[in-house]
């Protein structure tokens, strides 16, 4: 599947996907997530887990990372279904089961990060930055 790079105000075009996170029958709103090869894991704001998915993460595996604030941040890992919407951002193109991190201090203007463990590990990914598009294919 080929996706265009998207420009968010005050940024250069970047590889964003529209995604929906699910746990059981609970589903998030559409979230804009950047495909980030520099991110170790996929990271979402804690609000997604609490507000939309109603998930209690207090007993899930903790994970610490740094990068978005320059300081050590604490997150909780949870098994979720991640639906990737088609290039038009309206219909579901593919859905995978994966593990994502949820962090209450995560601040990213684009919404969320799709990283190495749990996203890149599930897709063959290629970037064509000069032509402002990228492709993903489920493994």
Image (cartoon, rainbow, N blue to C red):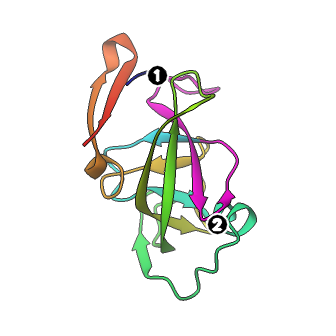
Q: Which quadrant holds the C terminus?
A: top left
* Res 124 → quadrant: top left
Residue at left 47%, top 40%? 34
Look at the numbered discs 2 and 1 and tell me whether their residues touch, using CB distance below 8 Å. Answer: no
Q: Is residue 17 magenta?
A: yes
Query: Could you give the CA–CA distance between mark 2 and mark 1, rounded to whole angstroms?
Result: 27 Å
Per the image, the residue denoted by label 1 is 5
Task: Examine the rendering and report whether any part of residue 74 can be seen.
Answer: no
Q: Is residue 27 magenta?
A: yes
Per the image, the residue denoted by label 2 is 49
Task: Examine the rendering and report whether any part of residue 20 can be seen.
Answer: yes
Tell me the magenta residue range. Answer: 5-31
Task: Decide which of 127, 67 is in the foreground and name it.
Answer: 127
Q: Please tell me whether residue 3 is drawn above or below residue 106 in the rendered image.
A: above
Please state the horizontal and vertical placement of residue 129, each as a whole percent of the image: 33, 19
Residue at left 47%, top 49%? 113
Tell me how many marks there are.
Answer: 2
- Looking at the rendered structure, the secondary structure element under dot 2 is helix
Residue at left 61%, top 66%? 105
Front of the two marks 2 and 1: 2
View extreme (front): residue: 25
* Res 98 → quadrant: bottom left
Q: Is 118 left or right of 10, judged from the image as shown?
A: left
Task: Decide which of 14, 26 is in the foreground and name it.
Answer: 26
Q: Is 94 left or right of 29, judged from the image as shown?
A: left
Q: Which quadrant holds the N terminus?
A: top left
Task: Decide which of 119, 75 is in the foreground and name it.
Answer: 119
Numbered circle sitting on residue 109: none
Residue at left 66%, top 42%? 30
Q: Is 90 left or right of 12, judged from the image as shown?
A: right
- Looking at the rendered structure, the secondary structure element under dot 1 is loop
Q: Please tell me whether residue 63 is drawn above or below residue 47 in the rendered image.
A: below
């Amino acid at each position: 599947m080929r996706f265009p790079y998207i420009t968010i105000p005050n940024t250069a075009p970047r590889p964003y996907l529209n995604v929906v996170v699910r746990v059981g029958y609970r589903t998030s709103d559409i979230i804009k997530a950047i495909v980030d090869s520099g991110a170790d894991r996929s990271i979402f704001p804690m609000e997604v887990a609490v507000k939309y998915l109603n998930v209690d993460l207090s007993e899930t595996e903790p994970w610490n990372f740094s990068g978005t604030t320059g300081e050590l941040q604490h997150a909780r890992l949870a098994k979720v279904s991640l639906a990737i919407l088609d290039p038009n951002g309206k219909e579901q193109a593919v859905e995978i089961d994966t593990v994502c991190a949820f962090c209450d201090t995560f601040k990213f203007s684009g919404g969320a990060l799709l990283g190495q463990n749990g996203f890149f590990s599930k897709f063959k990914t290629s970037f064509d930055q000069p032509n402002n598009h990228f492709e993903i294919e489920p493994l």
